[in-house]
Image (cartoon, helix red, strand yellow):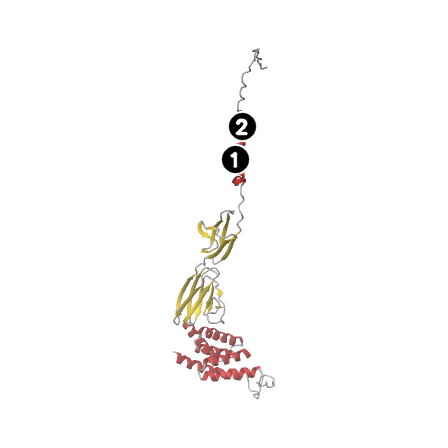
């Protein structure tokens, strides 16, 4: 198929060379058309002359089937002075080197440019050929029905962002760059046949790199589910070797690093002699969080101090003595001796 394809493209470029050279860049000594006023000849280094020079260079390179070099020459000519024939020739070079997605949109652009000028700039034979090539390429392109979860995933194909054309998205059209967020959960991708590398990414999720090879005209679904990244936490305290309980599990002394799924977890950090630190920690997928607990020295109760209990013991002992003496009955005095007279005075209670 490739040799026949090349011969057809070469013929088309040669057919296109005449209108582009004749209509857009007349020789300086060529008289102007009768219906147009005479114009001074353009300098040899003027834009029109440079565009014509690049166009003729591309035509000669195409004759020798040097399609990549011819493409570069035609693109230089188009940058100086756009023309539907130049656009058409760029499409034929892209088709020859297998850049089918770019060739398709380029042929479509050549037809639009021709229609915008009234439809008589691009010769009829090239209009028909462009339509034939467009239909042929459409049958060669690969269509991938891509389904991705979760929403908001960015995609790059072969290191390039996609180019939206209507409801479809084309690969290979844009320069290398970061992926772009997919517009919907399901997206139709238009790709060249062959091997492709799909790179999916979203913050908080594990990136995915998928390699796929497609035959010409393939129609294939592709489903991608990204996995959530765990949250990573570094837990420490302002005193060493504090014990950590996270999510109800004892994890050991600080400092420590842990990974957990996204969610909300109770955190408790303790050390003897310090007030415990407790908190509720909420972490998202892929989040990195550092926690340092400010443990404060414990406030000792007066009932727990040694001097309190020593003093209390002394007070209790003194209290027992006082109570004893307060409650002990007075001793009875010894009986009075009346002496030699035998007189004894009796006491009476009033």
Q: Residue furthest front?
A: 340
Is 273 in front, or is 22? 273
Between 162 and 217, which is closer to the camera in this rendering?
Answer: 162
Residue 289 seen in the current view: yes
- Percent x, y of residue 342: 56, 11
The residue indicated by pointer 1 is: 313
Residue positioned 54% across, 31% down in the render: 318
Q: Quadrant of the N terminus?
A: bottom left
- Residue 322 figure quarter: top right
Q: Quadrant of the C terminus?
A: top right
Q: Disc 2 marks which residue?
A: 323
Looking at the image, is mark 2 or mark 1 earlier in the sequence?
1
Judge whether 95 appears above or below 284 on screen.
below
Query: Percent position (x, y) of residue 5?
Result: 41, 79
Q: Residues within 10 Å of mark 1 (few under 14, many from 20)?
A: few
- Residue 81 shows up from this direction: no
Q: Secondary structure at mark 2?
A: helix
Q: Residue at x 52, y 82 (%)?
A: 54
Against 331, residue 53 (above or below) is below
Q: Position of residue 76 (x, y in %)?
A: 52, 79
Alpha-carbon span between mark 2 and mark 1? 15 Å
Between 284 and 6, the one nearer to me in the picture:
284
Q: Is residue 42 above or below residue 113?
A: below
x and y, in percent, of residue 155 in the image:
46, 65
């Amino acid at each position: 198929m490739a040799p026949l394809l090349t011969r057809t493209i070469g013929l088309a470029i040669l057919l296109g060379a005449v209108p582009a050279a004749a209509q857009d860049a007349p020789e300086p000594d060529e008289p102007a058309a009768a219906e147009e006023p005479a114009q001074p000849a353009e300098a040899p280094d003027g834009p029109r002359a440079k565009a014509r020079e690049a166009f003729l260079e591309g035509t000669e390179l195409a004759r020798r089937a040097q399609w990549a070099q011819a493409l570069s020459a035609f693109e230089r000519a188009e940058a100086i002075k756009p023309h539907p024939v130049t656009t058409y020739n760029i499409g034929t070079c892209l088709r020859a080197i297998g850049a089918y997605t770019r060739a398709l949109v380029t042929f479509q652009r050549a037809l639009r440019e021709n229609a915008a000028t009234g439809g008589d700039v691009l010769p009829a034979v090239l209009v028909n050929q462009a339509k034939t090539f467009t239909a042929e390429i459409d049958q060669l392109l690969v269509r991938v029905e891509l389904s991705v979860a979760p929403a908001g995933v960015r995609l790059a194909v072969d290191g390039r962002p996609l180019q939206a054309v209507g409801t479809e998205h084309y690969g290979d059209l844009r320069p290398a760059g970061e992926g772009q967020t997919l517009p919907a959960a399901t997206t139709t991708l238009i790709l060249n046949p062959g091997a492709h590398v799909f790179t999916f990414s979203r913050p908080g999720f594990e990136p995915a790199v998928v390699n796929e090879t497609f035959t010409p005209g393939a129609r294939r679904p592709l489903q991608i589910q990204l996995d959530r990244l765990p949250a990573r936490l570094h837990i420490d305290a302002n005193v060493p070797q504090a014990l950590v309980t996270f999510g109800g599990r004892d994890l050991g002394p600080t400092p420590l690093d842990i990974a957990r799924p996204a969610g909300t977890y109770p955190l408790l950090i303790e050390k003897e002699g310090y007030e415990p630190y407790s908190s509720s920690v909420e972490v998202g997928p892929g989040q990195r969080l550092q926690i340092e607990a400010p443990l404060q020295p414990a406030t000792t109760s007066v009932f727990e101090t040694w001097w309190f209990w020593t003093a209390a013991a002394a007070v209790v002992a003194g209290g027992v003595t006082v109570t004893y003496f307060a409650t002990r009955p007075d001793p009875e005095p010894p009986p009075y001796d009346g002496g030699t007279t035998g007189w004894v005075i009796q006491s009476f209670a009033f």
